[in-house]
Amino acid sequence: VTDQEVMSKLQEVFDEIFVQKIRLTKELTAEGIEEWDSLTHTFLEVAIEEKFSISFSYGAFAELTNIGDLIAFIKNILKSNEP
Amino acid sequence: LFKRGREGLDRNQLRQYLNLKDERLLPEFFNDCEMARSLSDYQFLYQLKHQIINNVLFKDLSDSSTRDILILSPANLHVFGILMDIQISAISRSFCYNLNYRFYGDLIGALEEQFKHKHPDFLMVFPTPKVNEQSISEISHLFDFFKKQENKFNGEIAIANLPLPPTPFPGANRNKYFSSAWRIAKDCNQVFIKDNNFSFHLIDLEFLSALYGTENVFDTKQWYQSKSPFTYEFSNRVAKECVALVRSKEVTPKKVIALDLDGTLWKGECGDLDVNELEVGPGYPTGEIFAEAQKFFHSLKERGFLLTLLSKNDESRALKTIVDHPGMVLKIDDFSCHQINWDRKSQNIVSLSRQLNLGLESFIFVDDNPAEIAEMGLYHPEVHCVQVPSDLSKYLSELEADANFHTQDLTDEDLLRTKFYKDQERRNEDLKAIDNEVLRMQFLQTRAEIGRLNAIDKKRALQLINKTNQFNLTRCRLLASEFEKIASDETKQVLTCKVWDRYGFLGLISTLIASKDMATNSLWIDAWVMSCRLLGRNIPEAILNQVVLSARLEKLEFIFGRYLKSDRNGPFADLYTRLGFELLKDNGDEKVFRLDVSNYVEKQTQIEEIR
């Protein structure tokens, strides 16, 4: 999987969850996005897990700093899930 | 206006609601809410709803239909709150606010603090679902606290018990260890059912967790990360149960069950077969299924439903089958009335509704024939139709799962009594602040529904006659059989009066029996009883207005009232005089009064009279 593929799938998740339109970039963080509170963060975690059919380990999701981080993290899990 | 996308809700179209400034589009939005299926649907609509409230429509939503629901828990039930918020919006077309209270520690302290500010319409309390050694005493405390609050709290209270914990620790004997989580949770839940002398609702998480499989209930990762205890799926299931509870307060409950015969109460057609060839009861392959279904209907009758028969059959043959078949659980006397003939069922059900004096919206129709179900749905969409499943092994479980058969507690007048007295205290408290009689009446917003006795109310109307001592003008006492005879007598009228006010339903509080006397072209009030709880609200005046109205319709000239003295009814000796009757005869223990219908001026009661 490429960064771009993961990014576009993530964009779909964000479009489903946020009312406000958010354009994803690798540098994007929750900072300054009003809807992105701790609760939305929880929902986002569940929605991403569902979208990619993966499961984040305990505490891992909270440690990510920006979207670039998240993409790398997802790619890592997907890779380790490969047979 | 907004069509759904191929998969789920179209987000871009939903976003357009934000640009709209017209509250008439709210129903459209609610329709979309009802389409929500996935967690992200709910989250999106929740966010959208709150932005609409804040930006666009805030003023329009602060009307009386707004329900305010507060969910309190030491665990974080945000997810659960969102699910409920959107589901309740969708169902009741009214907004509710979820104030998820997030705190650790003293739940009771938080409740007391909350009660100082505001009483929500519905308060739902979820104790933390993780148990420890202190849990039992904490739950007992909570329980006692609510029993004390009952009299002070201005809304409905629902408390959740504990879901059963999925941990196998400490092994096979977990049920024997007082300190195992399994045993603690079960002991805690005993606290909720140790006595039934309370009027709050129980949200039965024990049942739901068992139904769901306890392993699928808890989300340990989210518990440690955000104190959100339940999986999304389980939260959704609990939310549905709570929404059903809130909703049950808003819709007319079902009261009458109209039952088909062949294929519904037994297998086979009674027109073609001998009685012993019809399968119901033990000894037949599928007889047990029908016997269980009949038992189910019988239990509903015990809980206050009326059973009626609605069948295309030969009447005498059908009734004979009911009497003669040894496997019948339901007996002929269990049915309040029947329509058994070859006419359309959609017509016959109207006759049943007239006979019972209950609207079609209170009917449930059960039939095995899809064509009959379809016909009923076409003509009377307000009737709830239940189709007997083609796989008969599912018959009973489908009946039991249908929420229309679920009775909320607190419908029976006897059960309601605790609530009456609790409301009375609050009412007196509130009225103290108002020193003007007219303003008081306005404040109370009393509504009285006065009309002919219907079948559901018979028991209560008779009970009222037989236990009222004070406002019982003719010392009336009746046997059920006597009352039955009066109720079916064409020359007599039985009126009942049901009352509501701003605190809710106050019950059926008056029964009046009158008979027409053609010889004198007048109406005699043979008996009149009223519960003394509601004196001073002009209810006798409202009832008299109705009596005069019906006398006028029948072109009667006079209304006669009688008073027979008893030890207790002294305060009402001059009731008729106060109501404008003229005293005709007085020999101490008996007085007779007369009212000239043509001179009667309708009394101003300051209450809303529904006829």
Image (cartoon, rainbow, N blue to C red):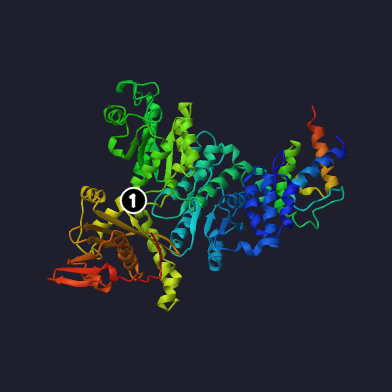
| Position in image of residue B561 (x %, y %) | 22, 65
Viewer-proximal residue, B386 or B581? Answer: B581
Viewer-proximal residue, B71 or B464? Answer: B464
Viewer-proximal residue, B290 or B225? Answer: B290
Q: Is residue A25 visible?
A: yes
Residue type pointed to by label 1: Asn
Relative height, residue B43 to residue B278 (above, below): below
Relative height, residue A58 to residue B16 (above, below): above
Viewer-proximal residue, B227 or B486? Answer: B486
Task: Indicate left or right for B134 with B290 as reference.
Answer: right
Q: How packed is label 1: few (under 14 Cα within 10 Å), some, or many (20 or more)?
A: some
Q: Which residue is at 33% across, 48% downward?
A: B455
Report which residue position mark 1 lands on.
Answer: B454
Task: Indicate left or right for B259 with B158 as reference.
Answer: left
State the residue lying farthest toward the front: B555
State the image quarter where residue B167 is shown: top right
Q: Which residue is at 39% across, 43% downward?
A: B350
| Label 1 element class | loop
> Which image quarter is the N terminus of chain A in?
top right
State the image quarter where residue B18 is shown: bottom right
| Position in image of residue B594 (x %, y %) | 21, 69
Q: Is residue B387 visible?
A: no
| Position in image of residue B131 (x %, y %) | 55, 48
Chain designation of label 1? B
Q: Which residue is at 32% across, 34% downward?
A: B330
| Position in image of residue B247 (x %, y %) | 51, 51
State the residue lying farthest toward the left: B587
